[in-house]
Image (cartoon, helix red, strand yellow):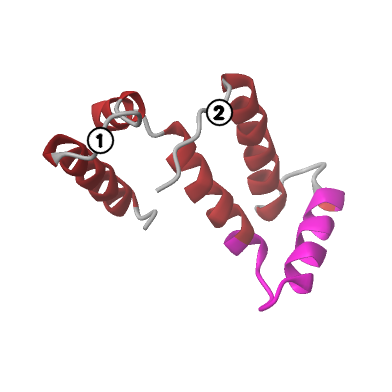
Amino acid sequence: MFLRAVPAWETDALWQVHVALRRARDGEPDTAALGDLLREVGEDCHPPQTAADITDRLNRVLAVLLLDIPAVRTLATALDTPQDTDIQNTYEQIRTAWATAGIC
């Protein structure tokens, strides 16, 4: 697992991108150019991806970045200590939360 603190303004900006991509994927008014770009990017992926695939993947990334459960905070504060049972239990709680959210 790789734990990284991300400033709130960065997650806010990423969330705004996600909202714009979802609107374009759904064909909302004034999003045609972005929708075309999203489809082109998807076609260039290997294997090709749909606009829904791309926005769903970004949604999973955001879910991980915004996951705020006690286990995440415990693990973040314990990184400088040797591995012990509490840390392993904390890690398992995070993995369970991710699995429940459909992230891993």
> Which stretch appears magenta?
33-53
Q: Are marks 1 and 2 in contact (CB under 8 Å)?
A: no
List x then y, in percent, for residue 86: 14, 35
| Label annotation for residue 2 | none
Residue visible at 71% across and 46% down?
Answer: 28
Which residue is at a point 69% across and 47% down the rendered structure image?
21
Quadrant hosting residue 93:
top left
In the picture, the quarter occupied by the C terminus is: bottom left
Q: Let me know if residue 95 is in the magenta part.
A: no
Main secondary-structure element of the magenta-colored stretch: helix
Please say if 64 is above or below 32: above
The residue wearing badge 1 is 82
In the rendered image, residue 26, in percent from the top left (x then y), is placed at 65, 52
Select label 1 or label 2 by which is in front.
1
**Residue drawn at point x = 19 percent, y = 44 percent:** 88
Q: How many marks?
A: 2
The image shows residue 93, relative to residue 53, as above or below, that is above
Give the residue pinned by disc 2.
Answer: 6
Q: Is residue 56 above or below residue 97?
A: below
Residue at x-position 66% and y-position 70%: 49
